[in-house]
Amino acid sequence: MPADMRQTMRQRLLAERGAVVKEAGAVRLRFALAYPQTYHIGMSNLGLQTIYRLVNQRPDTLCERVFLPDPADISRHGYANVPLVSVESQRPVRDFHLVGFSVSYENDYLHLLHMLAMLRIPLLAAERDERHPLILLGGAVTYLNPEPLADFADLMIIGDGEDALNEYLDLAHDTLGQPRRAHLRQAAEIPGVYVPALHDRSGDVSPMPPRKIADLAQWPAYSTVLTDETEFSGSLLIEITRGCPFKCRFCTVGYVYPKFRQLPGETVLDIVTAQQRRDRDNGLTPVGKVGLISSATGDYRALPMVAQGLVDMGVGIGISSLRMDRMPDVLIDCMVRSGVRSCTVAPEAGSERLRQLIRKEMSEAVILEGAERLLAHGMRDLKLYSMIGLPTETDDDVQELLSLVFKIWALMKRYGRPRGALGTLTLSVNPFIPKPATPLQWCAMAPQRDVKAKLHTLRQALRRESSIRLHHGSLKDDYLEAVLARGGRQLGAFLLEAHRQRGNWIRAAKTLGFEAIDWVCQPLSRDAILPWDFLETDRQRQRLHREHDRAMAVP
């Protein structure tokens, strides 16, 4: 391993709070926990943080983290020449018994293949044997559509991984050294463990329900390792709820997760108290900021107690986003008292008609009232999130989005001028991407020319206000996400070619004669068997059809 990369890893490890370092000779199993993104991004992922803690609690198993090397290291040492080693010991990952990838986003699939190539092992599971570590996949994408990665994984954990992973590690401990095929057949008997090689999904839709945990208090998800070298620098992140009580028709969370589950408020405060105690025992400044992770923060029953408790502990509060119609005064007040001056809210669509279509039924009056409450409490900066390119969207809908933005900006000026600080209003927009397991999964993505035209309209209208910023990501990335979200096992060849083309998926599609963008811009047949159907029951599919019909009936 190049000396500069080894030094960087050692410095990161020394700067962390909470890393677990074990002696390899003291355990039976070596488990490399990989995240197909850089350290800076991966260390913000609660799934990775939680699995790292749970596996290292086992006395028979060592768990060390692995990340995609930084772009500068790849550029310096060559695309295929950077060795993949763990953070804790800088041990080559190929020397581990298991490599478990936590995969949260479709666009990381190509990073996963790049990391497999760095392992110097065959990319395809069918070409690997007992000389190679087993490749295990888990994470959010397995809830939605694991099939594009089926050719590359020896096995997957579908759904919540906490229970299932422990059961699988028990099996791995007992069968270490057994022939690979026999081991995988035994693993497939564990509920929630999916061995793609044992299933031909071309016409098989026999259900395989994702594994689900009922009690979040048994398996709380929170930051195990704290570091300043991440987006949420030095923050302790805690998942306070899982699932969502709302059923927005574009969003997977309300459909693929079981009922809305909540972490007891006492557990949240205990986690923070324990972290602060560890910090003091180690002569460190106690953690000063907590991020509360939830898809529906305002519906968390223990929110008043938790918010007040954190303020009393002298801890700042961060949240991912708020619904305008679910903003308890106690939360806003505690956020402002702890120094927070910026908040993200998500109208999701610019017009009331489109919000009805996606089942996020909030009137403009409710949105404006919510914005005014935030500003009146002392918020300075606001960030609005909205989609463009939704089914049936017209130019009038885009104009309504602009009208809403300017009305909120007028409120910000009214509250900001007496304070001497107008603040910044950021409009973050992304094109609608039809996702599996949602009522809009059959819809087409808007053509690129239409999305670009709408972005141009927004950009031209907002340019006269320097304190209103328009933000959007890469359209190229958005359309790749749509392709990978919609595809089945046949996308394995596309991913392989894109890997050979060093991530240039447009060139890869052209090489294969695959009109990828045109494909996602066409609706799917309502009668088609979809690659992810095996994760759903007939009742769930009927519900999606029913909600799709209701959406399309919105005038």
Image: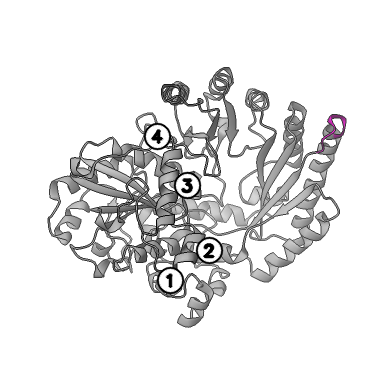
Give the residue at mark 4.
18
Amino acid tagged 2: Ala
Distance, label 4 to label 1, CA atoms, is 35 Å
Mark 3 touches mark 1? (CB < 8 Å) = no
Q: Residue 234 carries which label?
A: none
Give the residue at mark 2.
482
Give the residue at mark 1.
499
Amino acid tagged 3: Tyr
Mark 2 touches mark 3? (CB < 8 Å) = no
Amino acid tagged 4: Gly
Distance, label 1 to label 2, CA atoms, is 18 Å
Q: In the image, which is nearer the foreground, mark 4 or mark 2? A: 4
Residue 362, image quadrant:
top right
Residue drawn at x 78%, y 47% is: 405
Q: In the image, which is nearer the foreground, mark 4 or mark 1? A: 4
397 left or right, relative to 497: right
Residue 88, image quadrant:
top left
Residue 498 falls inside the magenta stretch: no
Q: Of label 4 and label 2, which has the lower sequence position?
A: 4
40 left or right, relative to 448: left
> Judging from the image, what secondary structure is the residue with disc 2 in?
helix
Q: Residues within 10 Å of mark 3 (few under 14, many from 20)?
A: many
Residue 49 in percent (x, y) is at: 41, 41
Quadrant location, the N terminus: bottom left
Towards the viewer: 555 or 532: 532
Give the residue at mark 3.
255
Distance, label 4 to label 3, CA atoms, is 34 Å
